[in-house]
Amino acid sequence: MEIELKFNIHSDQVADAIWQNELFASIEEADSRDEMCLDARYYDTADYSLSKAQIAYRVRKEGERWVAALKWSGTNEGALHSREELCVPVFDNKPDVSIFAQSDMGDELMRITGGRELECIFKTQVHRKMFRIDTGTSIFEISIDSGRVITPYGQEPINEVEIELYSGETEELIEIGKKLTDKYELTIAEDSKYARGINLIKNGR
């Protein structure tokens, strides 16, 4: 289960301030800082059967490695996003449903796609800066993303911060999010990157 908060960042100055981490400096995990480029492709059948079933199939290059991910049963309440997630390391960005064959969701994926060819329906290109914080009872990763959603029907910029719960309680995640929004006047990001890509496609077709 992936559980995270998403907020919009409205200026480079705010993004830089969050990265400087004055708010959580005392609980930042040592040596947890990292930066990487995330180039993702989202796949579906020609008739969008996965999207209709509310399943996202993504293959993403994370630094030097490739990771395929399935996400499903997603819900969001304001900034809080929760969904089931299954990730598998792969060798390249080619879609291959068989890599999920050993899971129940892999069986569902193969049933829905029915052997039909999968095609890239849109891409995201993101530069991510991240660090972890440890409150003593919970661990979170804070990611600052800048980039864009790219579809055949248009593009949108990505400027957001995500706070992902690694271990601990959702209540403390919400408390951390409130501290961040109160200090930097962030606004709720109700749509995931996947949802934003699908909305661009729907509005453009």
Image: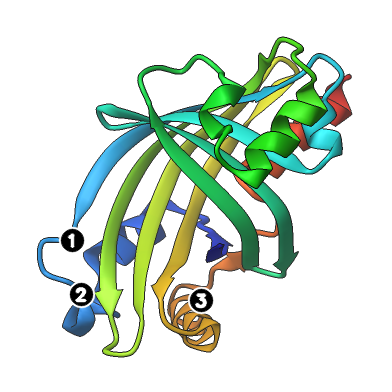
Asked if the residue under mark 1 is in contact with the one under mark 2, i.e. CB atoms within 8 Å, the reply is yes
Asked if the residue under mark 2 is in contact with the one under mark 3, i.e. CB atoms within 8 Å, the reply is no
Circle 1 residue: 32
Circle 3 residue: 181
> Which residue lies at the image location 37% right of the left edge and 63% below the top edge?
142
Q: Earlier in the sequence, mark 1 or mark 3?
A: 1
Dot 2 amino acid type? Glu
Crowding near pointer 2: few (<14 within 10 Å), some, many (20+)? Answer: some
Residue 66, visible in the rendered structure: yes
Could you tell me which quadrant the N terminus lies in? bottom right
Circle 2 residue: 28
Determine whether the residue tagged by mark 2 lies in a helix, strand or loop. loop
> Which residue lies at the image location 45% right of the left edge and 65% below the top edge?
164
Determine whether the residue tagged by mark 3 lies in a helix, strand or loop. helix
| Distance (Cα) linking label 3 and label 2 | 18 Å
Dot 1 amino acid type? Ser
Residue 76, by quadrant, is bottom right
What is the x, y in percent for residue 118? 68, 15
Dot 3 amino acid type? Thr
Determine whether the residue tagged by mark 1 lies in a helix, strand or loop. loop
| Distance (Cα) linking label 2 and label 1 | 8 Å
What is the x, y in percent for residue 52? 86, 36
Crowding near pointer 3: few (<14 within 10 Å), some, many (20+)? Answer: some
In this picture, residue 46 sits left or right of residue 140: right
Camera-nearest residue between 44 and 27: 44
